[in-house]
Amino acid sequence: MPAMHYEGNIIRPPSEANSIILQVTVGCSHNKCIFCGAYKDVLFTIKNDEIIDKDIDFAAHYCRRQNKVFLADGDALIIPQKRLIDILSRIRSKLNWVKRIRLYGNAKSILMKSVEELEELKQYGLDRIYMGLESGSDEALTFLRKGADAASMIEAGRNVRKAGIFLSVTVLLGIAGKEKSEEHAIQTGKVLSAMKPNQIAALTLMLLPNTELYRLEQEGRFALMSSNELLGELRLMVDNISCRSQFQANHASNYLAINSRLPKDKDVILSAIDDALAGSTPLTPEFLRAL
């Protein structure tokens, strides 16, 4: 029986679990973040059209119950506009029951395209971009080697929204360490408020042995935070978010699951965090946490 031509680790957002995963690139075009171990020692490449076409044909025969497509790997938006439109066109032609196509995009790849080009991608079926902000603190972004500052992140996020594409933004609790936790929380809340994403997803840092951040922690140059410190950081971050957005902290890495709407549920979220800090609500045990 034929199969998809997957290479390496296939990373996707949790919400794309039931999507057709079409790998159009291998690795990540940036691949410099010190906390990410997903694509270490992987040379970023755009897969050739013949392989992509074979995988689309496979999906046409065997994936007819799935009505969404996620374009992997780490930053498919970096594909040049004409070629990306060609891929989207082939998906629309051969998988005509699919109405929604999603992908990861970093600030650089988003800003390489004009708002008009993003609008064109929407016309060909792209309806959601997942963007990793991680932190709104310029100091933290430099430390993490994200390749963008807060102003670039805001501009990229706003451009996605201007194009009418659903914007899902990820932030990382604990990523700035203990010393910079307060600045990280406040500035991340402010940047999110300026971006106005449709969805905010908060994850909690879990160190991977093949990353530079793991090495820094082992050398005593980066301090991990306790569960209560992370909850305090989450509380401060939420308190500084003023935009309307779906807010989720229900990833498996988190100690406290939250799935709410801002701003209407802000008081409920803050109260839930306070209850957890007081010990009234049990936290997710370490053995159940995962990436």
Image: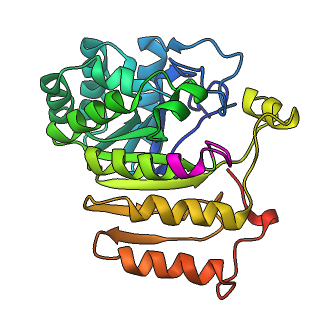
Where is residue 4 drawn, in percent x and y?
Answer: 56, 31
What range is drawn magenta here?
175-184
Instruction: Locate the N terminus by quadrant.
Output: top right
- 11 vs 170: above or below: above
Magenta stretch encompasses residue 235: no
Question: Which residue occupies 51% across, 47% down?
Answer: 183
Q: How is the image coloured?
A: rainbow
Q: Which residue lies at the image location 52% right of the left edge and 46% below the top edge?
A: 184
**x, y (%) of residue 274?**
56, 79
Left/right placement of residue 201 relative to residue 6 reads left
> Residue 156, can we see it?
yes
Q: Position of residue 163 (x, y in %)?
A: 16, 36
Q: How many marks?
A: 0
In this orientation, which residue lies closer to the viewer: 290 or 157?
Answer: 157
Instruction: Please identify the residue farthest to the right as the structure is shown.
Output: 219
Give the residue at x 29% y 69%.
Answer: 263
Q: Quadrant of residue 5?
A: top right
- Helix, strand or loop: magenta stretch: loop
Instruction: Determine whether 170 is above or below 146 in the image.
Output: below
**Residue located at (43% from left, 47% from top):** 188
Give whichever of 231, 47 is nearer the camera.
231
